[in-house]
Each structure stands twice: as C-alpha cells, then as structure tokens.
Amino acid sequence: MPIRSTSRMQQPAFAPQQSAHPLYRKILIPFAIIVVLVAIGAIWLSSVRSRITVTVKRDTTGVDDFIQVAKNPESGQLRGRVVQGTFEKVQEFSVEGAGTPVSTGVVAGTVKIINNYSKPQTLVEKTRLLTSDNRLYRIDKTVTVPSKSSVTVKAHADQEGAKFALSAGEHLTIPGLWIDLQKFIYAEPVDAFSGNQTVVKTVGDSDISDAYKTLQDVLTQQAEKSLDTEAATGDGWKAIYDIKVQDPKNNVSVGQKADSFLASMKVLVTAVYYPTSDINAFLRDKLKDKLPDGKDLVDFDASQATFTVDSADVKNETARLHVTANAGSRLTDKSPMLAKTNFLGLTDDAAKTKIQAVEGVESVDVRISPTWIHTIPKNGDHVEMIVQ
C-alpha cells in the first residue's frame, strides 16, 4: 500500500492577544471611580456620630392620702400601735410685765403757797388744799405768805390711798379763803406727792394664753414619755400624737390686779406608732403611681411628710392617718418620648424642635461629628442620648 505523505502548516503555540477595545476602557474607568466613591461613602457614614443632651425640668409631685394602721394588720393595712392616756396639771404662774408703781398709806410732799394779792396772807396749820377733782390735802404748820411772794411748806393728804398721789405743778385751791381771793392765793406741789411705793401688776390676755401653752407643752412631754413606754415599739418606729385639750381653768380674769395666779389643764393624748420603713415605702409607691411613664422620683425626703390622726380605735388598736408628702420628679432616659429611635435620620434642627416639644424638657443640645454634617445617623449605635 503506497504511503501518502501529508504536509501540515506549522501554527504558533499561542495566538497573539489583541488589545482591548477603547469602548471597554471608557466603561471601566467610571465604574472603578464609582466603586471607590461608594467605599468612601460607606466609610464616611460609619464614622458619623451624634450626641443628644437633654436637660429636663424638676417638677413636684404630691400625694394626699390616708393610711390604715393596725396592731394586727389585715389586707391594705400597715403595722401599727395605738395607745391613749389622760394627763392633767395645776401650776402657779407669775403675772408678767413691769406693772404700775402706786403709792400706799398717806402721801405727802412740799407745796409752794403763791400770793399774788396786794396784802400778806396767813394760813394756819391744817389749812385745806383742794384739787380740781376734789382730793383734799392739809398743810403741816402755820405760814404767812408776803404779798407778791411765795413760801414752801410740808403738806399731806387728808386720807390714805394711792389716788392721792400728786404730780409736781398741779394746781391746788385754798377753799378756806374768800372766793375772790382764791384766784390770787393758791398752791402747787413742788415735787410729786407719794407714800410707800408698790408695783401693781394687771393680768393680761398673754399671761393666760402663755400659761395654757406652758401647761400643754409640759403635759405633752409627759404624755409622750409615758405612752412611748407603754407602747414599747423599739427602734425604727415613729409616733404621731393627737392632743385634745380639756377643761383649761384659771382663778383670775383679764384686767384683774394680781402678782400671780393658778392655771390648770387636762389633755387627752392618742399616740399612733408605725414603722418608718413601711410608711416610707408606702409613700414612695403612692408618689410613683402618680408619675407618667418615663418619669422618676428625685429628692424624696420622707421626713418632710406630714401626718395627722384622722381617727383612732384604742380598744382594737387601729387608726387612720392622713398624710401629705411631696417629692421632686423628672423625665429620665427611659421615657418613650425621649427614645433615640424617635430622632434617627432627622436633621439637628428637626430633632431639637421635636425634643423641645416634650413636656418636661428644659433645653436640648445636638452635636454631630463631623461638624459639617447636620443629619443624625440612622444607625442607633452611633447615637448617644443623655438625659440630665
């Protein structure tokens, strides 16, 4: 069989690569730029941070309620003790004030006899001198008063008594003289007439009211000590004392002259005891119940609460207390209105306006970094909310 030979053309191992078409190059470059910008944008967005600081107002929340206490508390009652006692006292009190000095016995002094007549005048011992209100005095010896002159002589009241005290210069007539002479010849005390001095005090309203107050204070202290011993509650308990004053008496009247007087008083004291921890917890719960969501108590001081005994059953040892208390309150970061999710994606101005509209907010500060950005990030992890 004849052998055929064939000839093949030699082909290169690799075909030469043709250069990219110019159109592809035009598409590739913008695409690469877009990818870079997207990457830069993603990095930029992840770096934006915002801090929102909200300053809130302090409000006052009050409670005005009643509390039931009992020695053996049932549902709705708190632990307590109720004891009662009657206490009385009689005490002597001094009348306060400087009082009024008065003269006692026969008052006496020196008088000047004045003679404005044209002739001398002799006045015998015990010549009468008379005031305009008819108080009578007598001179102690005979004197002669020259014309247009005067003499001095001792004189005394005709009777005993403080009403005969005289002031210096007071006008005294001489009724034993002829009526027309009396206007020319008369007498004046040279100094005040006085006898034995004594101070007379007068009972006033304040004397009696002060005495009753003192009695009530003394009896209250006595009652508290006695009832505390009887209740024997120990540490951690507090008491409210209801004091009823009964039968206050005294043995004087206002305006009466006296140096001292007696006063007496009786008081009925009801003491209600309770554990302070239980009452404080009750008040805190009552105050919190009045707060809306997102508000909390601040500055609560249970010692400032006021208590009064509304009613008490001593036999069964139960009582109803009327209590009023106040505490500060404010918004917290738990408030639904201040949740940061409410402000994601808002502009800083829009966020401020929205937060400022929340009742209880005083001021708002929104800070965004970088500073040239004015939109709060949508990623909540990049937003810090501070309520203060």
Image (tube, rainbow, N blue to C red):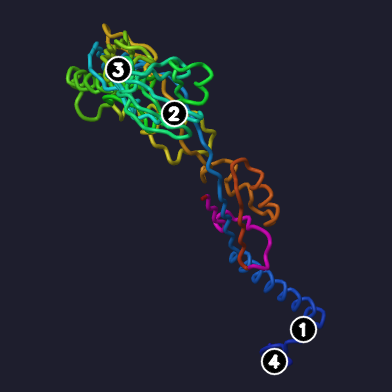
Cα gap from disc 1 to disc 2, whole angstroms: 164 Å
> In terms of depth relative to the viewer, which is nearer, 121 or 324?
121
Q: Amino acid at mark 4?
A: Pro
Dot 1 alpha-carbon crowd within 10 angstroms: few under 14, some 14 to 19, many 20 or more? few
Q: Mark 2 to mark 3: distance in Å?
A: 51 Å
Q: Name the residue rendered at 27%, 16% in the picture.
A: 261
Q: Nearer the viewer, mark 2 or mark 4?
A: 2
**Which residue is denoted by mark 3 in the rendering?**
258
Instruction: Please identify the residue farthest to the top as the structure is shown.
Output: 315
Tell me the element at label 3.
loop
Nearest to the eye among marks 4 and 1: give it.
Answer: 1
- Viewer-side label of 4, 3: 3
Label annotation for residue 12: 4
Q: Which residues are magenta?
A: 371-387
Q: Residues within 10 Å of mark 2 (few under 14, many from 20)?
A: some
Name which of mark 3 and mark 1 comes first in the sequence.
Answer: 1
For disc 2, the marked residue is: 120
- The vertical placement of 120 against 41, above or below, is above
Q: Tell me the quarter of the image containing the N terminus.
A: bottom right
The image's mark for residue 20 is: 1
* Residue 119 versus residue 134 in the image, above or below: below
The single residue placed furthest to the right in the displayed view is 23
Badge 2 marks a residue whose secondary structure is loop
Tell me which label, 4 or 1, sits earlier in the chain.
4
